Image: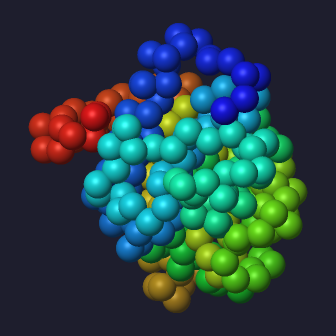
Amino acid sequence: MSGVDPWPLGGEHAETALRRDLAAAFRLCHRFGWSESVGNHFSAAVSPHGQHFLLNPRWQHFATIKASDLLYLDAEDDGVMSGACAPDPSAWAVHGTLHRAMPSARVILHCHPPYATALACLQDPTLLPIDNNTARFFGRVAYDLEFGGISDTAEEGAHLVRALHGHSVLLMGNHGVTVTGETVADAFEDLYFFERAAQTLLIALSSGKPLAVLSDAVARNTAEGWHPYRGMAERHFKYWKSVLDREEPDWRD
């Protein structure tokens, strides 16, 4: 690890808290049925410019991840993939590139939740605003419809950076979803609501009847109306961490 990009905020204690929050996100992702074998990846920037970040180890099941298991990586280290604890190639290509190029994306959660993935497989996967949850994401979702297989090259990482630019959610055609946020709680809350929104839209589409799509003005107003409720994310995440404390206390280790 190089000496640049120092600890943020409370130093080592801040990293410990971040490790625990990210570990909780993995455990909860599995509980909610969003994990997939031992694939998919979550990461969180430790340093102010995103160069140093935490990432799950290669092929470790989400249900087993503890705070101490998370890799501490340097996005500028060309030797990462030749090391003894090298991450999954696709994780390094995507998350390493995103943290390097987009320091504002503090937390990056990528997985294949059933409804979000099903939505991503439609010819037109636009998340139409038809209720509070779908409208929550109005103007915040980018769409990448150029699926080319597993994202395990630097070129693909750069492509995703361009696709995500200016947005906090990327729906990846024929693939899944990537959500970014300032904190783990914020990103996880958006992942939670995006999956709920995709579920609502797909169920409504399955009726075969015309959708009552909100106007852009109403959808935008609804999205903006969510801003004062941002504190819900921390409260929601805190509740689920208390459940983990009771039922899977080793997540903090």
Question: Where the N terminus falls, by quadrant?
Answer: top right
The answer to whether 14 is drawn above or below residue 100 in the figure is above
Which one is in front, 146 or 50? 50
Residue 126 pos. (x, y %):
70, 70
Answer with left or right where residue 122 lies relative to residue 217: left
Which one is in front, 129 or 239? 239
Judging from the image, the colouring scheme is rainbow
The answer to whether 153 is drawn above or below residue 168 in the figure is below
Residue 242's image quarter? top left
Tell me the residue at 70%/70% (across/down). 152
Question: Where the C terminus falls, by quadrant?
Answer: top left
Q: Is residue 47 visible?
A: yes
Residue 137 pos. (x, y %):
64, 51
The answer to whether 172 is drawn above or below residue 83 in the figure is below
The answer to whether 75 is drawn above or below residue 17 in the figure is below
Answer with left or right where residue 19 lies relative to residue 194: left
Q: Is residue 201 visible?
A: no
Answer with left or right where residue 105 lies relative to residue 55: right
Tell me the residue at 70%/83% (across/down). 149
**Which residue of the protein is positioned furthest toward the top in this rendering?**
10
Residue 43 pos. (x, y %):
56, 46
Which one is in front, 202 or 245? 245
Tell me the residue at 77%/69% (across/down). 153
Residue 96 pos. (x, y %):
71, 50
Q: How many marks?
A: 0
Tell me the residue at 73%/35% (across/down). 51
**Which residue of the protein is positioned furthest toward the bottom in this rendering?**
208
